[in-house]
């Protein structure tokens, strides 16, 4: 704690102040949180660990919630990936779009009547609905991590449907995204 400029008394005061609002984190006695890595204020020792992490026992219901969140976020990523392809197909006929073209009322009207743009908007709305549902089952960080699969979905669809190339660097970046998702969910 000394490296953060806090001592045991300061930390206890902070926890006491924030405990009044009764956050959704388990609290009891002189500790904040339950399980390994929680803050303990026994005389002469302090361990901050992961005090902001929810410490729920791993149960079948907990696994089901995480599974549901992953399934919903994955569906959101797939719909969002398809929406990106629709948007790309929708702007294709317009060529390069500069600021002057974007400000044109005729351009906006043409854009909003494009079947691909409309499909992209609808798929984005569906993706958002799945995303919101996923948020009700898991922490934001875990849901957003899975949602990053939309990059992978978009890249695969762009390769298959638009014949866009995937370089070794593109594939390495997509691999890092997958690795990041695994790391975020490693303790779920």
Image (spheres, grey):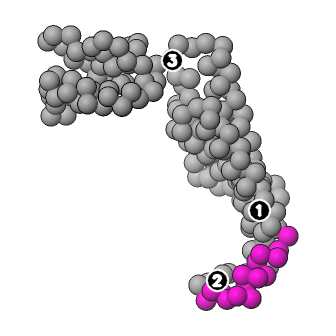
- As rendered, which of 36 and 96 lies closer to the eye? 36
Residue in the picture at 71% in, 47% down: 129
Where is mark 2, residue-wise?
102
Rendered image quadrant of residue 46: top left
Graded by Cα atoms within 10 Å as few (under 14), some (14 to 19) or many (20 or more), the crowding at tag 2 reads few
Question: Magenta stretch: residue 103 in it?
Answer: yes
Question: Camera-side residue: 31 or 98?
Answer: 31
Q: Is 170 situated left or right of 18 in this image? A: right
Boundaries of the magenta span: 100-115
Mark 3, Cα crowd under 10 Å, few <14 / some 14-19 / many 20+, is few
Q: Relative to residue 43, is residue 97 depicted above or below?
A: below
**Residue lying farthest front?**
20
Q: Secondary structure at mark 2?
A: helix
Residue 15: image location, x then y, percent: 27, 27
Q: First in sequence: mark 2 or mark 3? A: 3
- Label the magenta part by its dominant secondary structure: helix
Query: What secondary structure is marked by label 3?
Result: loop
Q: Earlier in the sequence, mark 1 or mark 2?
A: 2
Q: Which residue is mark 3?
A: 56
Location of residue 93 in the rendering, given as x and y in whole percent from the top left corner = 79, 79
The answer to whether one can see residue 153 in this image is no
The residue that label 1 is drawn on is 120
- Give the spatial CA distance, label 2 vs label 3: 50 Å
What residue lies at 77% left-to-right and 75% top-to-bottom?
Answer: 112
Q: Position of residue 72 (x, y in %)?
A: 71, 37
Q: Nearer the viewer, mark 2 or mark 3?
A: 3
């Amino acid at each position: 704690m000394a490296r953060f400029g806090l001592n045991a008394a300061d930390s206890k005061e902070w926890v006491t102040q924030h405990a009044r609002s009764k956050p959704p984190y388990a609290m009891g006695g002189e500790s904040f949180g339950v399980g390994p890595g929680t803050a303990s204020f026994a005389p002469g020792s302090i361990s901050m660990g992961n005090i902001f992490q929810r410490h729920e026992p791993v149960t079948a219901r907990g696994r089901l919630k995480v599974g549901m969140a992953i399934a919903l976020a994955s569906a959101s990523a797939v719909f969002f990936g398809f929406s990106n392809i629709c948007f790309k197909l929708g702007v294709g006929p317009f060529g390069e779009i500069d600021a002057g073209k974007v400000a044109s009322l005729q351009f906006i009207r043409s854009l909003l009547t494009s079947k691909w743009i409309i499909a992209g908007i609808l798929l984005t709305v569906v993706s958002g609905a799945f995303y919101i549902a996923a948020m009700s089952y898991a922490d934001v960080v875990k849901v957003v991590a899975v949602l990053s699969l939309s990059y992978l979905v978009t890249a695969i669809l762009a390769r298959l449907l638009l014949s866009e190339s995937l370089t070794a660097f593109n594939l390495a970046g997509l691999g890092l995204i997958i690795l990041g998702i695994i790391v975020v969910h490693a303790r779920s």
